Amino acid sequence: MNAGFYLEAQCKLDDFTSLLSQTTTLSDAPNAISIDSNIPVYDLIASGNDLSTVAARSMIMAEWANILQHGAGVFVIKRAVTDVDCIDDATTAFKNIIKQENEANGGGADHFAAAGSNDRIWNSLQKLCLTAPQTHIRYFASPAIDAACESWLGPSYQLTAQVNLVHPGGQAQQPHRDYHLGFQTADTCAQYPAHVHELSPLMTLQGGIAHCDMSIESGPTKLLPFSQQYRPGYAAWRRDDFKAVFENKFVQLPLNKGDAIFFNPALFHAAGSNHTSDVHRMVNLLQISSAFGRALENIDRVSMCKTVFKPLSEAWQSSSLTEAQLHAVVASTAEGYPFPTNLDLDPPIGGLAPKSQLTLLIESVKASIEPHEFDRLLNEQSSRRVA
């Protein structure tokens, strides 16, 4: 590897496969009820851990964190949502939302899957809360889910959710890693120092709540235990040889309605193909973020961009700024990250992430557009990002 950076061409398949040869035993997860395909499976009701004391909660949270970072990278909680009637009520609400959104705009785009193979609800958290608040309350009244989120991210985490509904015949996703660096292109990933690759998985947690009983045939998530331990994985997962290893070694676990699965976002994973004729596999995907992923101050960067655009364009057109100087100015002025956004209004186009404010400013300066036209483009971009 280049000193301090992870490059796709320099990733070593042998190093990756050696990590995958590990095994999980009950001594690694003493509070689990079983180990299935190296994945610890928990049932807090059956084991009598009701998380009601600080000691009991801390014990299980420490175990889960160790699994996510140093173990298989994934665990399952049986009966994480015990109110299955509430799951059904939420499913009904989600199906109504899907119907309304499909009628309005043809449905939402998806990451890592072919168009038309599923239905997606972006921001299902807010949409369920606003359309069915009583169901929202019952649905998220789960100490197990709360403890799982906090085990990896600590208190004050930020929860988001997205429904994925895969119909009979729906095809599998491509194997991938997830947010943050998993939503960047290979070229963009290569620009981040190695230590950021290792930090990214510590900032988010992936989860999912099963809305129906899921046999292997219905295509539950394909998982590659221990793959999160490969440090250059965000540079490697697009390579065909790494994908081939994934397809040869992945495992899947059947889930029941109300079960939840949590995994390190650096784990290689993909939704499976639905080979059934009658199971419409619905999962409410949880994307949970650390409370620490925020800046110190709220900055009105829209106003800053509008104010600086004309003099910045003039400086660029007169060649009084180099490319490096232009980038430095824009980086100190505009919002460089495309998230968070409203993915219904601001979907990824030509990639995994929508265009950032920084990209819009640089493109507009180089295109020598008029200030009023830049104001219009910036206002439209800003309006699309509003929840």
Image: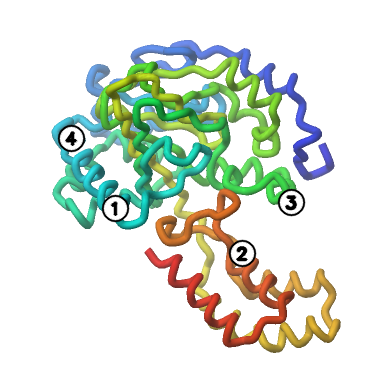
Residue sitting nearer the eye, 248 or 72: 248
Q: Secondary structure at mark 2?
A: loop
Is the residue marked by circle 4 packed among few (<14), some (14-19), or many (20+) residues within 10 Å? Answer: some
Quadrant in the picture for the N terminus:
top right
Label 2 vs label 1: CA separation? 34 Å
Task: Tell which circle, 2 or 3, labels the residue nearer the N-terminal end.
Answer: 3
Label 2 vs label 3: CA separation? 14 Å
**In this picture, is 308 found above or below 230?**
below
* Residue, disc 1: 103
* Residue, disc 3: 191
Task: Tell which circle, 3 or 4, labels the residue nearer the N-terminal end.
Answer: 4
* Residue, disc 2: 336
Label 1 vs label 4: CA separation? 23 Å
Nearest-to-viewer mark from 3 and 1: 1
Question: x%, y% of residue 376?
Answer: 52, 80
Looking at the rendered structure, the kind of residue marked 2 is: Gly
Q: Secondary structure at mark 3?
A: helix
Is the residue marked by circle 1 packed among few (<14), some (14-19), or many (20+) residues within 10 Å? Answer: few
Q: Secondary structure at mark 1?
A: helix
Residue sitting nearer the eye, 57 or 277: 277
Is the residue marked by circle 2 packed among few (<14), some (14-19), or many (20+) residues within 10 Å? Answer: some
Looking at the rendered structure, the kind of residue marked 1 is: Glu
Label 3 vs label 1: CA separation? 41 Å
Q: CB under 8 Å between callouts 2 and 1? A: no
Q: CB under 8 Å between callouts 3 and 1? A: no
Nearest-to-viewer mark from 3 and 4: 4
Q: Is residue 56 visible?
A: no
Looking at the rendered structure, the kind of residue marked 4 is: Asp
Q: Secondary structure at mark 4?
A: helix
Residue sitting nearer the eye, 28 or 282: 282
